[in-house]
Amino acid sequence: MPIDLYYMPMSAPCRSVMLTAKALGVELNLKMLNLPAGEHLKPEFVAINPQHCIPTLVDGNLKLWESRAICTYLVNKYGKDDSLYPSDPQTRALVDRLLYFDMGTLYHRFGEYVYPVMFFGQEKLEPAKLEKLHEALGWLDGILAGHDWAAGKSITVADFVLVASVSSFEVCGIDLSKHRNVTTWLARCKAGLRGYNEANAPGVKDLARMTEVKLAGK
């Protein structure tokens, strides 16, 4: 049976799932939802996911949302080995820490900074919230020091999740240049992650176009 993914290309969480699937060689049956048009509120989608959020994965009788849970599920079920989500408890703990850091701190602070202007009618960006985002980026910069990938010497799901976020920051005008390890790692991801140009780049371009309209002069 096909694996359905309900998604929107601009969404960083959706793109992290798509990057994970590309790394695994898993084909997803992509079902785009237009959130501004309210397609996620249609009864047929709410029947699948009562929280009506994306990404949502349907794999047989499993209906799963929350992007980071989807990423780890795909590796656990379809990975040929455990390299993308290591089974060693200490290494897995480092990966999990980064997934939670992205969800609860890094991407959360980005959303607090840009989403009020992009989606909720706030007139101006708040400099104090940008400072909080840069604080989180500074922590990520420290995490990345001394190794090529987020959790160490090898690519893991943490890289897929974090690059979907950080590439979004870049096109939304966040100056990453003060975070040298972040910029070096981002360039490495763009060049070295399987399927990056197919799974992440198009959605980032869509987000960049929206940014030009929504955040210009803010």
Image: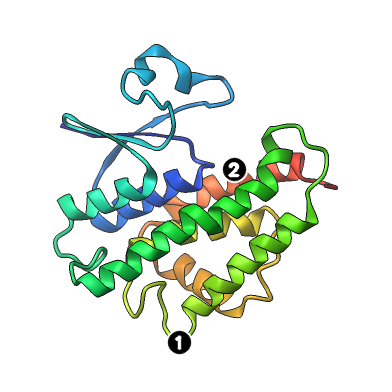
* Disc 2 from disc 1: Cα separation: 33 Å
Answer few, some or many: residues within 10 Å of disc 1's Cα (few below 14, many 20 plus, some between 14 and 19): few
Q: Badge 2 is on which residue? A: 206
Q: Earlier in the sequence, mark 2 or mark 1?
A: 1
What mark, if any, has residue 146 been given in the picture? Answer: 1
- Could you tell me residue 63's position as x and y percent? 26, 31
Q: Is residue 210 left or right of residue 47?
A: right
| Residue 155 visible from this viewpoint | yes
Q: Is residue 166 above or below residue 8?
A: below
State the residue at coordinates (23%, 49%). Answer: 73
State the residue at coordinates (32%, 54%). Answer: 20
Q: Are marks 2 and 1 in contact (CB under 8 Å)?
A: no
Secondary structure, mark 2, is helix
- Could you tell me residue 39's position as x and y percent? 48, 20
The part of the image, by quadrant, that contains residue 168 is bottom right
Q: Nearer the viewer, mark 2 or mark 1?
A: 1
